[in-house]
Amino acid sequence: MATPVHFTVVKNLLLGAIPFLLALHLFVLARGRNFLWWLLAAIFVAFLPNAAYGLTDIIHFIAAVKDPALDRTLVWGVLLPAYLIYMLINFEFYVISIQLMQQYIRRQGWLLAARWSIPLIHLLCAFGVYLGRVQRLNSQDILERPVLVLMDSVRDLTHAQPLLIVLGFFVLFYALSLPVSRLNLILLAYFRHRLPSSFV
């Protein structure tokens, strides 16, 4: 019997939660900016692609669909809902992190940064996901093997195919983030109206 392709959901969810928790600290709880703040901000940018990366794990579900050894009821009744929930949670980590970052930038009065921060962060994450999905690098490699990551990045940026893949990820993340971001704002406004101020 063939072994189905699978991945560690808990690990990937934890990796997606890291930038979300960093965003809460950096853009909501932190008071002032010091060296540690900037260091954590760099780590936030390095780990943010992990939250968007979950969308690309759809390839594992496709592999499960193609696996004749897997029961169809299991595939459509269990795996499909599980993958959808997993991808939704991770992508929410991604979108909320970016929303918190943008709100922080606006509060600082950095008007130019507020205008360009969203497309820029989506582009950086698209390239980060490319490095992870195609080159099989991860955020830890940035810390442990920065020269390798830099060399791979420079090489890939000089070829058309990697750039097209990055562009595809960029369009995907940007397009999907728009309705999710809008829905988040609607839900936030709703709960602010319905709940006591101490709860929101």
Image (tube, grey):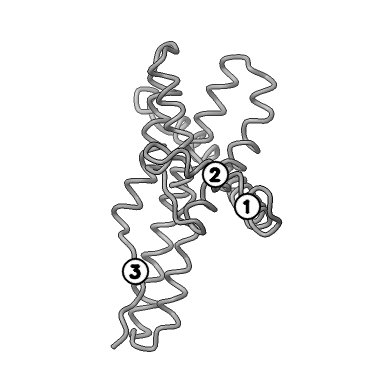
What residue would you read off at disc 1?
166
What residue would you read off at disc 3?
6
* 95 in relation to 175, above or below: above
Q: Residues within 10 Å of mark 3 (few under 14, many from 20)?
A: few
What is the distance, in whole Å, between disc 3 and disc 1 at their CAs?
24 Å
Q: Residues within 10 Å of mark 1 (few under 14, many from 20)?
A: many
Residue kind at label 1, given as amino acid type: Val
- Residue 133 appears left or right of 5: right
**Which residue is at 47% across, 53% downward?**
132
Q: Which quarter of the rendered picture does the C terminus lie within?
A: top left
| Most foreground residue, 82 or 37 | 37
Can you give x and y, in whole percent of width and height, for residue 98 in the image? Answer: 52, 35
What is the distance, in whole Å, between disc 1 and disc 2 at their CAs?
17 Å
Q: Secondary structure at mark 3?
A: loop
Of circles 1 and 2, which is in front?
A: 2
| Most foreground residue, 62 or 156 | 156
Residue kind at label 2, given as amino acid type: Met
Earlier residue among tags 2 and 3: 3
Earlier residue among tags 1 and 2: 2
What residue would you read off at disc 2?
151
Can you give x and y, in whole percent of width and height, for residue 51 in the image? Answer: 44, 47
Q: Secondary structure at mark 1?
A: helix
Residue kind at label 3, given as amino acid type: His
Can you give x and y, in whole percent of width and height, for residue 175 in the image? Answer: 64, 50
